[in-house]
Image (cartoon, rainbow, N blue to C red):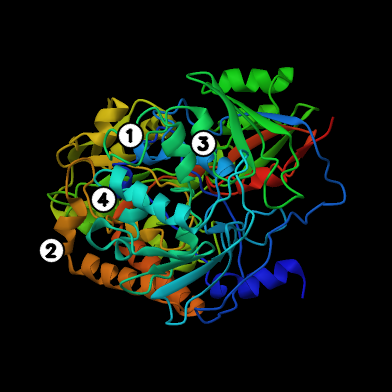
Amino acid sequence: MGDQQYWMTRGAGGISRRRFLGTSALAGAGLAGAALIGCSSGSKTAAPAGSAVQGTPTAVANASAAKRGGVLRIAGQLGGDVPSLDYDRTNGSAMGSISNLTGVKLTQWDERPDSPGPVEAVIPDLAESWETPDQGLTYTFKLRKGVKTSDGLEVKAEDVVWTFERQAAIRTPLGVLEANLRDMYPDRKPAVKAIDDYTVQVKLARPDADFLPLMGAHWWAVEHKEVITKKGTDLGKTAPGYGDITSAEQIRGGGPFFPSEYVPASGFKMKRNPNFYDKNLPYLDGIEHPFIIDTAAASAALQAGSIDAFGPLTQFSVQQGLELAKSPNLQVDWQPCMVWNPWVFDMTAAPFNDVRVRRALSLAIDRQSWIKNLLQGRGRSGSMVLPWLTYWALDPAKMGEDGKYLTTFDAAEAKKLLSAAGVEKFKFTLQTSNIGAYTVTYPFADLMQSMLANVGITQETKIVDYAAHIGGKTFPDNGIYQSFIVRPDIQSYAYAQVGMGGGTVGGKDVYGVLAKNDPEYVAFREVAEKQRITQDRNARRELIYDMQKRWARNVFNFYWPAPDSPVVSNKKVHNFRPPPGWNWNIMKYVWKDA
């Protein structure tokens, strides 16, 4: 059996997942960058939970042509300067890319260049094997020996336990990992212990089909206790004893790179970790990451040859991608929808508490015209998740009657629905933010405004400060709040997307009200809960299909057609095809011609 087939049938018990984080979960994330969504496929072979895996993930695609050496100059990987070098204290994703380049985790998503589905499979990282004898309640991880930081310090089981404890102690109110793995944190303390130097045991209160992928998520990386507590200038302002990461010299986690320099508001420089456990990787000597947010400046830098790649967290427009593709020295990798912004209805009050109104708004939009004319054919429509996104996603066009509200343009039917709901004409406010992924919405909001006017709906657009939009208590009365989905890492994406992770949207408990008053939403949540713990891959897929049909039928959120996203690099760069995730493991496999 080949390497690829082995992992797809054995990796992580044959259970592959992704997760979307949006709406309520995002309220505490504080990320101004774009969301990532792309396409991949995965094995349809079901396997029982509890299968142990072992081995070393090594680049295999084009390995004979791979070259060692060189420095990759890339921008657009971070959405801007980081609020803190201490990843545990940012409670967001700004340091996620750096953390994933410099740290190791128990598992990792399979982002090898030849992977049949970059985030569909889980493969070893710090843990070279694992097993669960009780079908997902207890996991025992056997750690790889000799995993060292660039300083030569070995990462052991006590560092894994300390990392989980540090994150729980520091992040307030909850870290993203903890918020999505509540059953691992009874009384806010991680149920993790070191059996010996190379064995870690984790206990869950109930099985969670997303647990293994979460152990490879970008929300955390194993930190070396000695590096942080001995080099730190403070032993911990908010959590005494856990140290403060205040300099790049403290970011040493056993990953393929380590930061050699950080200049605030300027960027990072990273070098290859000479002690990385896979001696074949990484190929690059280093990575330079200047902060370039303006896409016009990035386009000019690419064409001048002063940077090698741009993206994907900050995205070019479709038009910029088409123009850059004309350059003889550049290559463009078109990926579906790097930014995906659902509009959350205020379903706590009229008119959006009436499904007929929500359906009417959706039917009033001519999506195909939108894609053809505004996006020049480089865009797609979707419901809840994008139909081209993954093996788990269901194309709305295949949903029959359930999917018509997100695939059909029918202004006459929209007017009939509004009349039946007793609101033939009404006005609402769309609230969006002034920076980041939200700015992509402005031309779309204008187009929406003209389309809705044709059926008697008046849309006003309210642009507010990013911090007030995400972290504040604002939600326009009887209006729509623009959120965004934060990439598909594991498969229960809908869990947080629909407010099931707890919290509020723009200060309003939209989904809490639905859970009390809407039988359709209650039924949806029951299916969502069931799929989260379902260990059989095929059975879980059917449950997720059921979820998507329910979502489309009830139009709980509105989705506009999303543009394809151009990720651009010069032709000297190889294997730079960033998959839809922020784990950025792909950078281990990138090389550059001299």
Judge from the rendering whether residue 511 lies leftward or rightward of residue 325; answer left or right: left
**Which label was assigned to residue 415?**
4
Kind of element beneath mark 3: loop
Kind of element beneath mark 1: helix
Of badges 4 and 3, nearer the viewer stands: 3
Which residue in the structure is indicated by mark 2? 516
Which residue in the structure is indicated by mark 1? 449
**Nearer to the camera, 467 or 350:** 467
Tell me the quarter of the picture where residue 375 sits: top right
Of badges 3 and 2, nearer the viewer stands: 3
Q: Amino acid at mark 4?
A: Lys
The Cα–Cα distance between marks 4 and 2, rounded to whole angstroms, is 29 Å
Proximity of marks 1 and 2: CB atoms separated by less than 8 Å: no
Q: Earlier in the sequence, mark 3 or mark 1?
A: 3
Number of numbered markers: 4
**Residue sitting at 60 percent across and 66 percent down?**
42
Judge from the rendering whether residue 388 lies leftward or rightward of residue 34; answer left or right: right
Tell me the quarter of the picture where residue 135 sits: bottom left
**Nearer to the camera, 403 or 239:** 239
Up/down of 19 relative to 263, above or below: below
Judge from the rendering whether residue 284 lies leftward or rightward of residue 507; answer left or right: right
Kind of element beneath mark 4: helix
Of badges 1 and 2, nearer the viewer stands: 2
The Cα–Cα distance between marks 3 and 1, rounded to whole angstroms, is 47 Å
Q: Earlier in the sequence, mark 4 or mark 2?
A: 4
